[in-house]
Each structure stands twice: as C-alpha cells, then as structure tokens.
Image (cartoon, rainbow, N blue to C red):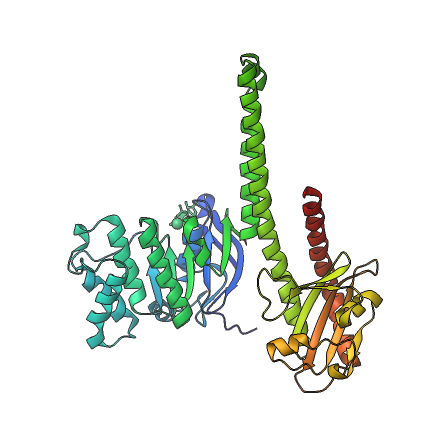
Amino acid sequence: MATLAPISIRGLNHSFGKGSLRKQTLFDISTEIPQGEIVIVTGPSGSGKTTMLTLVGALRSTQEGSVRVLGQELCGAKPAALEKVRKQIGFIFQQHNLLEALTAIQNVELGARVSGKIRRSQLRKRAAHMLDAVGLGDFLHHHPEQLSGGQRQRVAIARALVGEPAMLLADEPTASLDKKSGREVVDRMKFLAREHGTTILLVTHDNRILDIADRIVHLEDGRLSTFTDSVIANNRHMMQVLADNRKKQPIEEVVENLDEPGFNMLLNEITEESQRFLEATALASDVAFKSMLARGLSAFTHKLSQLLNAERCSLFLVEGNSLLLKVARDLEEGVEIRIPIGSGIAGAAAETGEVINIPDAYADRRFNPDVDKRTGYRTRSILSLPIKNQQGHVFAVAQLLNRNDGQPFDQNDEARFLSFIESIGVIFETLEDLSSFKQGAAELKS
Ligand SMILES: Nc1ncnc2c1ncn2[C@@H]1O[C@H](COP(=O)(O)OP(=O)(O)OP(=O)(O)O)[C@@H](O)[C@H]1O
Ligand SMILES: [Mg+2]
C-alpha cells in the first residue's frame, strides 16, 4: 500500500559486526510518522536510538526491512537517491561536526546553502536571525574553538533549522543546554512543525521536553514499545526499589532504642509518608487514566459520526441514575452535564434500551431546544443509540444529530451502528469497566 507519511518503517532489523561478533541492535521496528508530527524516542543508553535515527537519516545503509523516508525507499537505494533524501533533512547529532575553520554564522549559512531552499541574498540575514533565536546573537563571528560545548551545540541547532527542512532528526539536542535555552530550542522546533509542517524525530533523555511530543515511543534492547509501557515498567521498578529499601531497615532494632516520644515521632513519620505517597500516586494515575479513557471515548464518538455521516455526535455514560455527558463539541472542561435517566431523548434511550429515531426534533415533545438556543445550532433529526454490555445493560448512549445529506436517519444507519459496535464492543466495554472500577474506588475512598 502506498503511504504518504514522511517516515514509514516496517520490520526493520539491524546488526553490527560480522561472523561470531555479529550483534543485533534493532529488532522488528515498525512505525509511521505523519507529516508535521513531533515524535520523541526515549530509552536507556545502548538501546539503539542513535542507530535508528541514522538509518532514517540515510546515514547508514538499511540491511533488512523497509524504511521509507520522504517518499523514497532507503533499503537498497542508490547513493544519489540517498543523497537527495539527506539534503531535505536537518540533522542535530551528538557530535556537532562544526567546521573549525568557519565562524558560527558561516557554519549556519552552510546549512542553509546545502538545503538549497534559501536565496543567496537572504542567507546571511537568515543565519544571523537563527543564531539570535538560539541565544547566540553576540557570537556570530566566533570560531567553534572559542565556544563552550552548549554554545557549539546551539550553532549546530541553528544550522539544522535555518534551511527549514522537511524533516528534522535530532539526537539529544538539549543535552548540554540549560533549562531556558533548552526550552527555547524545542519551542523553535515546535514552531517549525506547526508552521512549516516539518516532521521531527527527536531522541532525548530530557524529561523536561517530553511535553512537545505528539507521540512518545520507547526503545528497550532494540525493540520499540509505547510510552505507556515504558512508564508502567519504570513505575514497577521504582516501586520495587522503594519496597526493597523499606525492608532493609531493621525496624525492630530502631524501635527498641526509642523512648515513647521518639517512637510516636517515628510512627507519625511513617504514617505521613504513606499518606503522601498514596495521595501522589492516586492523583498521578487518576489523571493519566482519565486522559486515556477520554481519548478512547473521543475516538469512538468521532468515528461513529463519520460512519453515519452525521453533523454532530455526542456520548453519554451511565453513572448511577443519570447520564453524564462525556464527549461533545464545545464541551467546556470542568463543566458537568447530567441528565436523569428517563428524561429527554438520550435518557429515554438509556431507560428503554431501544434505539430512538426522530426525523423532526422540534415536533417531538421530548426534545429540549435549550442547547440549540444557546449555541445557535439547528437540530433537525436525532438518532439516539443505547450501547449495552454483555449482560444487556445500557452503559452508554451515543447521540447523533443531523445527517450531512439533510435526510433523516434510517434503518441502514441503525444497522451500521450495530455492526460497528460489534466490532469494537469489547474494547469499549473494557474502557467502561475500568472507568466504573475507578469510579467505585473513588467513591469508596471518599
Ligand atoms: N558502529 C558500531 N559498531 C558496532 N556496534 C555499534 C555501533 N554503533 C552502535 N553500536 C552498538 O549498538 C547498540 C546501540 O547503540 P546506539 O548508539 O544506537 O545506542 P543509543 O540508544 O543511542 O545509546 P545512547 O543513549 O548512549 O546514545 C550499542 O550496544 C552499541 O554498542
Ligand atoms: Mg545515542
């Protein structure tokens, strides 16, 4: 299948060395990076991050699998084709490779010249501007040997960015920068991605910049996993360390040597510490979980409205005796909208478990026109779809408004919905189960 993504990797394996010394570093890597997306690669030292980056940058030949970059298959490509790909990429690598004989601004100009995108008359101005942007406005005419490690790195960054490349590959770009200049550099990258559609693949150990990523992937022993997997693995490890540490402390001995006030203090300390720990972990996992759940529900709702060709679609979850609006256009954060089960159209669908199809909303007594009044939207037809779990209980209601072709919803739409639900019902139900599990846990606590 043809792919439009600027980076598409399939079944990539890579090994170094020959014969008995041969060692595989990358195992069956597959991923796709759409245009303008910023993907961060994390992973421990030696996990294969730089190797992967050099393969994508056509700096190393691909041995096995497919690596398509900017429309060119790199595996087995001719040197001229590889060169053409490289010219469209800005590189920021661990070793900066500045030319010692040139000044900072000349090094940056060279970057713009290679890309061939910028007119000669503009070169100097652009280079100066870019150096200024990375905080080196006063160092334009210094030679690399007169600059610190962090400054040299910033020259390399300016050089990579100045040609506004279609793609940027960066290996630890903020490693030797302080917090402020590190932030400036990544903000600059974000700007390139948003304004120019630059696709960015960035390796980093720097947790402070993870927020600029559209997606984070993790390499461990040459295998790619999701960031969620890595956070879970890391958390387990940290928790284990914490648990093991506590065991090492021979608490009996400590207690024996304490008088009563001392003992009270110790007990207080332990209690307080546990409380803080519980609060912090509950908060962190709750926030992360809610965001994952919200993503799943939004994806579902959006796909459903596309499938049934509806102008709008919203989603309610059953919570106790009411429906809680979870996904809707212009749903304000922090505002909770609840409808008692049995009232309104969604409420009726939840109560009866039947699909409700209303061709003309304003002719139906159950329709409440308040939302239309507030938003200026004009509801014509409504399709309210109860979603049931395996026991047949309604746990959610999807509500579609107005078919795009102006016609009311029909039986084909209902049938399409049912087969869609069937195909993803299990995933959806798992999300719902987890959500009510969390809900239950939260209620127990309070
Ligand atoms: N040119 C090479 N020849 C032989 N082995 C290599 C070569 N380059 C890398 N390796 C090996 O491949 C593995 C992955 O190296 P790589 O540089 O990709 O790791 P990395 O994830 O970038 O690590 P770091 O975070 O330390 O930069 C390592 O075990 C390394 O020793
Ligand atoms: Mg590396």
Query: Is 68 above or below relative to 96?
Result: below
From what the image shows, is residue 415 above or below residue 259? below
- How many dots with numbers? 0
- Location of the C terminus by quadrant is top right
Residue drawn at 56 percent across, 18 percent down:
263
- Is residue 308 something that shows in the picture? no
Snapshot quadrant of residue 352: bottom right
Residue at 72 percent across and 69 percent down: it is 398
Q: Is residue 444 visible?
A: yes
In percent of width and height, residue 118 lies at 27, 75
Question: Could you say which is closer to the camera, residue 339 or residue 14?
Answer: 339
**Left or right of 198 in this view: 368:** right
| Residue 310: percent from left, percent from top | 67, 79
Q: Is residue 267 left or right of residue 35?
A: right
Image quadrant where residue 183 sits: bottom left
Residue drawn at (68%, 72%), measured in percent from left and top? Answer: 304
What x and y, as percent, mark residue 14? 47, 54
- Residue 101 is drawn in which quadrant? bottom left
Q: Position of residue 394 (x, y in %)?
A: 79, 62
Tell whether 243 sits left or right of 187: right
Q: Nearer the viewer, residue 368 or 445?
A: 368
Q: Nearer the viewer, residue 153 or 212?
A: 212
User: Which quarter of the rendering shows the N terminus?
Assistant: bottom right
